[in-house]
């Protein structure tokens, strides 16, 4: 796992409320463990969504938002899992910049 290439700077982020949840869709993936995400992102912001067990949602100072979530899992993945990164435009880059975690872009191919 190559999750430590940048230092997280979450102090520059704001938690997004459900009313202001990031619009857009799947932007990419980050393979890591639930414990590692909690260590970096804090406790999940939302529990038991429509098709998720846990979700985090942040807004950057420039207005870019990103979300991190599991998708259609019977329970919260604890071991290494390919977490979904959602949003639009620069969301994936913002996730990487502010968490220090590596992410791969979503592709139809």
Image (spheres, grey):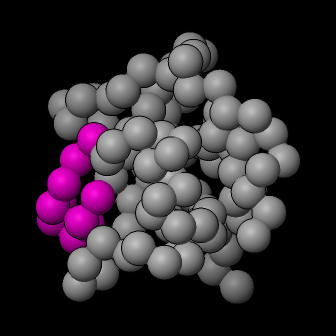
Q: Residue at x 41, y 39 (%)?
A: 42
Which residue extends farthest right?
Answer: 5
Q: Residue at x 59, y 67 (%)?
A: 32
Q: Residue at x 28, y 41 (%)?
A: 45
**Nearer-the-camera pick, 88 or 73:** 73
Can residue 91 be seen at all in this image of the molecule? yes
Q: Is residue 1 above or below residue 27?
A: below
Q: Residue at x 33, y 43 (%)?
A: 43
- Answer with left or right where residue 50 lies relative to residue 30: left
State yes or no: residue 12 in magenta.
no
- Answer with left or right where residue 18 lies relative to residue 62: left
Most frequent secondary structure within the magenta stretch: loop
**Nearer-the-camera pick, 95 or 9:** 9
Identify the image quadrant of residue 93: top right
What is the number of callouts on the image?
0
Return the x and y of residue 64 as percentages of the image width and height: 54, 28
Can residue 93 be seen at all in this image of the molecule? no
Q: Quadrant of the C terminus?
A: bottom right
**Nearer-the-camera pick, 7 or 50:** 7
Return the x and y of residue 80 as percentages of the image width and height: 55, 76
Return the x and y of residue 50 as percentages of the image width and height: 15, 65
Return the x and y of residue 46 as percentages of the image width and height: 22, 47
Q: Quadrant of the N terminus?
A: bottom right
Q: Is residue 34 above or below residue 46?
A: below
**Nearer-the-camera pick, 84 or 4:** 4
- Answer with left or right where residue 103 lies relative to residue 89: right
Q: Which residues are magenta?
A: 45-54
């Amino acid at each position: 796992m190559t999750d430590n290439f940048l230092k997280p700077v979450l102090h520059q982020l704001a938690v997004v409320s459900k009313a202001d949840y990031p619009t857009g869709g799947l932007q990419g993936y980050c393979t890591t463990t639930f414990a590692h995400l909690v260590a970096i992102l804090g406790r999940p912001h939302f529990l038991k969504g429509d098709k998720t067990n846990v979700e985090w949602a942040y807004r950057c100072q420039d207005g870019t938002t990103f979300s991190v979530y599991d998708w259609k899992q019977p329970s919260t993945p604890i071991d290494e899992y390919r977490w979904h990164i959602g949003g639009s435009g620069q969301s994936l880059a913002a996730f990487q910049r502010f968490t220090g975690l590596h992410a791969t872009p979503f592709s139809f191919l």
